[in-house]
Image (spheres, helix red, strand yellow):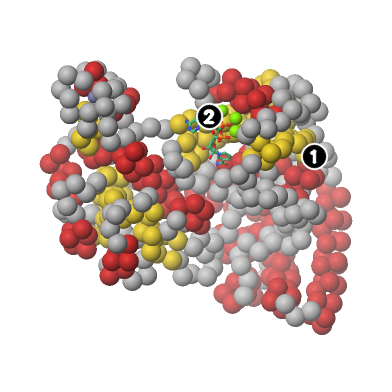
Amino acid sequence: MVPRLCKVGLFFKSRKRFKIFRSVSVINMSSRTGPEDTKKPFVDKYFECAENGNKEELSFLLKSTVNVDQRNEKGWTALMFAARHGQTGVIETLLEKGCDTNIVNKTGQTAQDIALFWDQNLAAKLIEAHMKEENPDQQLRNFFSLNHLDRASEKRKDKDWLQAKISDETSQFLLLSELKPFVLPIKDKTSKWRYRLCWLDHNKISSHLTSDTVILFLGIDHSSSQSLFAIDVSGKEESKFKDLQPEGSFMVPFPGSLQMEPSDAGIFAEARSMMDWLERYKFCATCGSSTDITEGGHKRVCRNQECKSNKGIHNTAYPRTDPSVIMLVISADGKRCLLGRKKQFPAKMWSCLAGFMEPGESIEDTVRREVEEESGVKVGRVDYHSSQPWPFPASLMLGTIAYAKTEDIKVDEDEMEDAQWFRRPEIVQMLTHQHPQGLYIPPEQAIAHQIIKSWVRNTASSNL
Ligand SMILES: NC(=O)C1=CN([C@@H]2O[C@H](COP(=O)(O)OP(=O)(O)OC[C@H]3O[C@@H](n4cnc5c(N)ncnc54)[C@H](O)[C@@H]3O)[C@@H](O)[C@H]2O)C=CC1
Ligand SMILES: [Mg+2]
Ligand SMILES: [Mg+2]
Ligand SMILES: [Mg+2]
Ligand SMILES: [Zn+2]
């Protein structure tokens, strides 16, 4: 969507920003000495290079001091400055360096919005082409859903194939101990992610395999043609696995997995939810007998031949996913949105309302029921936004935007600490960590963040 902002207004804002920014940086250099302040002249220079098209100096700054997605106090990134001024060479460099094209500034615009608004069509096309290359379907893919593996479900029933792949020297294994994945630190300081999954080949793990080790087939990585498995090593001394990979460690999944390289986080989501199901659903839900794991870990079969679960299709034999809705409720005047605080939330964090679906309920009705239960607000229309697997233990978040018909709030005190309407400018402060009281919303890895950001972005032109 192209924001319909007043161009002159934005232009003056932008010029003013530069004047203020530069004069502040001079004061900073002489009067303060914190690490951020010593970096500031370089950051200023970085933005200046983006604006002026100075690719060489910008590349040098990126190598030595500056983070590619560095923002200024108005939330602008170098990509935004380059987009504003149509600096296509700089845009190419920044895209090559892996800059994030989805960042919004404090008025809710992405770099592409800015390029379109200023008629920098070549710049807009470049950014769009890059976004299409990264995401050909042009669909928001939330964190934990970027699992690139082919799950190859047709192979799961082929016991010989699975057995051959388990002992194949090219196959790779992920260890999970008490649902904690074995990970390696990411050493590249310019990466915004801290961990990646540690894959081990059959030779390394074979001595840890016993007849009752749970082995889960995750899928095939088509780029390497490798088959990937997860194995449960719970109950074994975790420090022993250091011998296999001295830099490896078992990571506490929450919040650690939010810092995992996104594609690995998607594989982890599959592995964790599945392993949790395999561990917790050992007995048949229909007759209570023991079950056997089949189909590479994707099914449990009751040992009791007479059991109803062995006749026809029974969902008790398959892994669970609990659909939940999560919604940003917009006020009838379109100017505010409703956020809540669950009792367990960290101080000052506010988020979308959310709740589990009940059997026989539509997504829309679940949204209406949960919003009314938790806040007393009545909702009319509900639009789908995007979804997110949430592997704690196995939720599927169905993200929506919901339109309120009433305003009065009555908080469900059993579940919620508070629920309040927030105006857009305050939401922008919370989104960009600039709120005067330090209020904030969940990080970008949570679908709640993405839904809130969409609303801020889609209302960038409406002067709310
Ligand atoms: N990814 C994200 O941005 C966010 C994800 N969430 C997740 O959404 C899910 C649902 O949100 P809540 O507000 O907790 O739901 P909720 O509003 O339905 O309340 C939770 C209560 O519902 C009951 N319940 C009903 N079905 C359940 C099931 N299948 N599993 C567990 N409890 C069930 C339990 O009594 C539980 O205490 C949770 O898994 C939560 O972790 C919540 C907020 C943000
Ligand atoms: Mg809830
Ligand atoms: Mg609820
Ligand atoms: Mg509920
Ligand atoms: Zn049974």
Instruction: Look at the image and tell me in which quarter the N terminus lies.
Output: top right
Q: Position of residue 109 (x, y in %)?
A: 71, 48
In the image, is 429 to the left or to the right of 70?
Answer: right
- When the figure is inspected, residue 175 is found, relative to residue 322, above or below; the finding is below
Q: Is mark 1 within 8 Å of ligand 1?
A: no
The amino acid at mark 2 is: Phe
Asked if residue 177 shows in the view, the reply is yes
Q: Quadrant of ligand 3?
A: top right
- When the figure is inspected, residue 306 is found, relative to residue 236, above or below; the finding is above
Tell me the residue that label 1 is attached to: 423
Depth order, front residue of 228/2: 228
- When the figure is inspected, residue 194 is found, relative to residue 454, above or below; the finding is below
In the image, is 379 to the left or to the right of 24?
Answer: left
Depth order, front residue of 257/23: 257
Residue at the extreme bottom of the image, as rendered: 30
Quarter residue 173 falls in: bottom left
Tell me the residue that label 2 is attached to: 356
Residue at (32, 66) in percent of width and height: 239
Q: Nearer the viewer, mark 1 or mark 2?
A: 2
Secondary structure at badge 1 equals strand
Residue at (38, 46) in percent of width and height: 272
Q: Is mark 2 within 8 Å of ligand 1?
A: yes
Q: Position of residue 79 (x, y in %)?
A: 65, 59
Depth order, front residue of 302/174: 302
